[in-house]
Image (tube, helix red, strand yellow):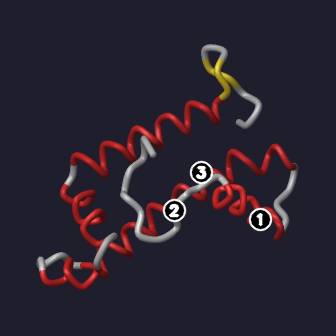
Amino acid sequence: MYYASLFGIPVPIWVFLIVAAGGVIVLNRTVFGRHVQAIGPNEQVARYAAIRVDTVKIVTYVLLGLCVGVATVLYVPRLGSATPTTGLLIAAVVVGGTALRDGEGRVIGP
């Protein structure tokens, strides 16, 4: 799947575009997305606003797990195997400037 292409564009690029578009839609157009954004800055205030913080966090982690699973299915064939050091690529995300705490809750834009 890593080496396949559709209309001359590699499949991982298509998957990225689909996941990013889905993220934009979910984050900006659904009640769940608004709850995720509300929990981000202040979890306690979100609780006062009657948001079920624990449920939203669990669903968010499940979605994260799905994204990791998809990334693994796309990435492991390139390597031929998975190693314990594969997770070190997260350092590239941090160096790239991704906020790990108290983010703005955006898929597109700075």
Q: Distance between the Cα atoms at labels 1 and 2?
A: 17 Å
Q: Nearer the viewer, residue 56 or 81?
A: 56
Marks 1 and 2: CB-CB under 8 Å? no
> For the residue carrying disc 1, how many other residues have a C-alpha within 10 Å: few (<14), some (14-19), or many (20+)?
few
User: Among all residues in the image, which is located at the extreme left?
Assistant: 49
Asked if residue 18 is positioned above or below residue 77 in the image, the reply reads above
**Of callouts 1 and 2, the N-terminal one:** 1
Q: Secondary structure at mark 3?
A: helix
User: Among all residues in the image, which is located at the extreme top?
Assistant: 7
Residue at point 50%, 34% (across, down): 17
Residue 74 image offset from top left, x and y in percent:
69, 45
Q: Distance between the Cα atoms at labels 3 and 1?
A: 18 Å
**Of callouts 3 and 2, the N-terminal one:** 3
> For the residue carrying disc 3, how many other residues have a C-alpha within 10 Å: few (<14), some (14-19), or many (20+)?
some
Disc 1 versus disc 2: nearer the observer? 2
Q: Secondary structure at mark 2?
A: loop
Residue at point 65%, 52% (across, down): 96
Q: Distance between the Cα atoms at labels 3 and 2?
A: 22 Å
Residue at point 79%, 62% (across, down): 86
Mark 3, residue position: 70
Disc 3 versus disc 1: nearer the observer? 1
Q: Nearer the viewer, residue 110 or 32?
A: 110
Three-letter code for the amino acid on which mark 1 is drawn: Leu
Asked if residue 15 is positioned above or below residue 102 in the image, the reply reads above
Residue 69 image offset from top left, x and y in percent:
60, 57
Disc 3 versus disc 2: nearer the observer? 2
Q: Secondary structure at mark 1?
A: helix
Mark 1, residue position: 88
On the rendered structure, is 84 left or right of 48? right
Picture quarter with the N terminus = top right
Three-letter code for the amino acid on which mark 3 is drawn: Val
The image's mark for residue 99 is 2
